[in-house]
Amino acid sequence: MVGNFAGMAGLLKGSSYSVKTDLRCITGPPIFDIPAEGTVAYPLSVMCAVGGNFYGTLTFTKMRADGSDDPDGENFWYTVEVKADTPKPERQISVRTQVHR
């Protein structure tokens, strides 16, 4: 759940945030709107091509009215840990080749 910190501070208006992550195996909407004094679930998809433990961040940066990131606005981030199992093979294929002599 992601809260609108501007709304919580008494600024009664919704906010738009750009969303970035440094993890290649997770995706979600690049722009996310949060109503004033609201908390909204951010839809996050995880699809890892390989198994393992992956660590990174998910950063929300408040946007200006023109759609650019506000360098003086609030931003907040979450640390993310993904523990992925090795995917099962979709199918097996046979490969034959002639060995060079």
Image: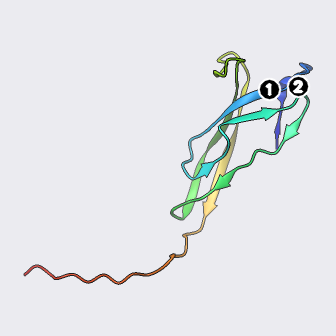
Q: In the picture shown, does residue 100 fall above or below 53?
A: below
Which residue is found at the position 74% from the left and 23% from the top?
74
Q: Quadrant of the rendered structure where residue 99 is?
A: bottom left
- Kindly identify the residue that appears in the image at 51 percent across and 63 percent down: 50
Quadrant location of the N terminus in the rendered image = top right
Left or right: 49 with respect to 97? Answer: right
Residue at left 56%, top 42%? 22
Disc with the residue nearer the chain's start (1 vs 2): 2
The structure's colour scheme is rainbow
Task: Judge from the rendering whether residue 43 lies leftward or rightward of residue 50; answer left or right.
Answer: right
The x and y percentages for residue 34 are: 82, 33
Viewer-side label of 1, 2: 1
Nearer to the camera, 15 or 78: 15
Residue at disc 2, secondary structure: helix
According to the image, label 2 marks what residue?
7
Residue kind at label 1, given as amino acid type: Ser
Q: Describe the element under mark 1 as helix, strand or loop.
A: strand
The amino acid beneath tag 2 is Gly
Give x and y (percent) for residue 78: 70, 40
> Can you name the residue that lies furthest to the left here?
101
Placement of 66 over or under 47, stated as above or below: above
Return the x and y of residue 11 as percentages of the image width and height: 89, 19
User: Given contact means CB atoms under 8 Å apart, are the residues at marks 1 and 2 in contact?
Assistant: yes
Q: CA distance from mark 1 to mark 2?
A: 8 Å
**Disc assigned to residue 15:** 1
Q: Residues within 10 Å of mark 1 (few under 14, many from 20)?
A: many
